[in-house]
Amino acid sequence: MSTANDYLPILIQASVALGFVVLVLVSTHILGPKLNSKKKDANFECGIESKGDARFPVSVRYFLTAILFVLFDVEVIFFYPYAVNFKDLQLEGLLAVIMFVAFFLIGFFYVLKKGALEWEK
């Protein structure tokens, strides 16, 4: 049985980490220089003068591919607990993983059928 005292070191570590982040953010804001000028605030990239507008349209397919990558990549993270405990989970755990993979395969085939991964049309 775990008690509240078992979580005290975690709470202390989280508090110290959060306190450090807040301290650094506040102190750099207070101690940092506040010099603004037109030349300082101008865009500068690799010594090349900026031309045109940086806000150009980007294909939605790029974002769709990125979102699908994250979706299917996160699936791999959920295999770790199964891999660690596969002996304890036995047949029930195997069936749960098969069902989990089946759901993602159904989604993957749906994405393929819709043509979301085809760049040239």
Image: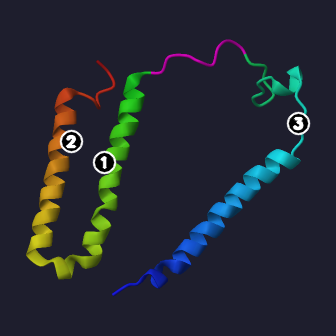
State which mark lies toward you, 3 or 2: 3
Res. 60 image quadrant: top left
User: Disc 3 residue type?
Assistant: Lys
Question: In the depicted view, which residue is nearer to us: 84 or 32?
Answer: 32
Q: Is residue 98 left or right of residue 32?
A: left
What residue is drawn where x is 15% and y is 71%? 93
Q: Position of residue 87 (x, y in %)?
A: 19, 81
In the picture provided, is 72 more to the left or to the right than 23? left
Give the mark, 1 or 3, whose residue is nearer the N terminus: 3
- Say which residue label 2 marks: 108
Q: Which residue is mark 1?
A: 72
Left or right: residue 65 compared with residue 97: right
> Where does the C terminus fall, quadrant-wise?
top left
Q: CA distance from mark 3 to mark 2?
A: 51 Å
Residue 78 figure quarter? bottom left
Q: Which residues are magenta?
A: 51-58
User: Which kind of residue does numbered mark 2 sit on?
Assistant: Phe
Q: Earlier in the sequence, mark 2 or mark 1?
A: 1
Numbered disc 1: secondary structure: helix
Q: Residue at the location (81% across, 28% down)?
A: 47
**Which image quadrant: the N terminus?**
bottom left
Q: Residue at x 29, y 32 (%)?
A: 117
Residue located farthest toward the front when viewing the structure as drawn:
4
Find residue 16 and name its label: none
Secondary structure of the residue carrying tag 3 is: loop
Count of numbered tags: 3
Q: How far from the left and from the top, in percent, is residue 58?
A: 48, 21
- SS at circle 2: helix
* Amino acid found under the numbered disc labelled 1: Phe
- For discs 1 and 3, the disc positioned in front in the rendered view: 3
* Other-residue count near label 1 (Cα within 10 Å), few / some / many at <14 / 14–19 / ≥20: some
To which residue does mark 3 refer?
34
